[in-house]
């Protein structure tokens, strides 16, 4: 009987957390579907630039500081930052090379630091379309 009461409390707390998150300012980022593209295709893939908060190339990595410079802007990453690879698997930030073109999603942390939570490796054959093209 105690087990069921505990499970009921956990379920209620989880439902309440989802309700609060869905009403927060960051809900659209948290619950947004991932960008739709198939990096395995040999033909040109068109990506909607609105699916990312920023698109650019990695120009510098600092593992000690856990940061990346992407198109002149500094971004910090954590151990939970997801990296979407060209074969649809997840990887780590450490596998990203300087010069790699990426699309990112981030949130603002303390002192306006940009904290990456998702990074997509953009295939070389990708065409980036402006939001107005959709």
Image (spheres, helix red, strand yellow):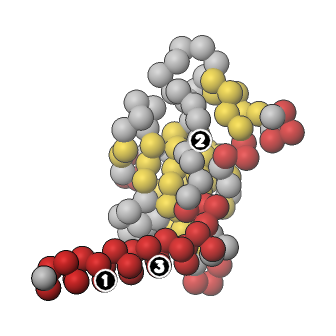
Mark 3 is surrounded, within 10 Å at the Cα level, by few (under 14), some (14 to 19) or many (20 or more) other residues, namely few
Q: Which residue bears the numbered disc 1?
A: 9
- Drawn side of residue 108 relative to residue 13, left or right: right
| Up-down relation of residue 115 to residue 13 (above or below) | above
Q: Report the disc number at residue 79.
A: none
Q: Earlier in the sequence, mark 2 or mark 1?
A: 1
Dots 2, 1 in contact, CB < 8 A: no
Whether 68 is drawn above or below 108: the answer is above
Mark 3 and mark 2 lie on one chain; the one further toward the N terminus is 3
3D distance between C-alphas at marks 3 and 2: 28 Å
Q: Position of residue 15 (x, y in %)?
A: 44, 73
Does residue 113 appear in this view? Answer: no
Residue contact at pointers 3 and 2, CB within 8 angstroms? no
CA distance for labels 1 and 3:
10 Å
| Residue at the top extreme of this rendering | 43
Decide which of 35, 128 is in the foreground and name it: 35
The secondary element bearing badge 3 is classed as helix
Q: Which residue is mark 3?
A: 16
Q: Are marks 1 and 3 in contact (CB under 8 Å)?
A: no
Q: Residue at (63%, 74%) from the top-left corner?
A: 23
Q: Which quarter of the figure is the C terminus placed in?
A: top right
- Left or right? Give the position of 101 relative to 6: right
Rendered residue at 61%/61% (across/down): 29
Kindly report which numbered mark, 2 or 1, lies closer to the viewer in this rendering: 1
Crowding at dot 1, Cα within 10 Å, few <14 / some 14-19 / many 20+, comes out as few
In the figure, 2 relative to 132: above or below? below
The residue beneath circle 2 is 35
């Amino acid at each position: 009987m105690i087990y069921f009461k505990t499970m009921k409390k956990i379920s209620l707390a989880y439902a309440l957390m989802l309700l609060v998150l869905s009403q927060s300012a960051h809900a659209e980022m948290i619950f947004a579907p991932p960008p739709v593209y198939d990096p395995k295709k040999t033909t040109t893939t068109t990506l909607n630039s609105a699916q990312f908060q920023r698109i650019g190339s990695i120009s510098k990595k600092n593992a000690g500081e856990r940061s990346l410079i992407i198109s002149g802007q500094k971004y910090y990453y954590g151990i939970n930052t997801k990296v979407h690879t060209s074969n649809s698997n997840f990887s780590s930030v450490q596998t990203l090379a300087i010069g790699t073109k990426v699309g990112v999603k981030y949130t603002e942390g303390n002192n306006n630091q940009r904290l990456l939570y998702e990074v997509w490796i953009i295939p070389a054959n990708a065409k980036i379309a402006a939001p107005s093209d959709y």
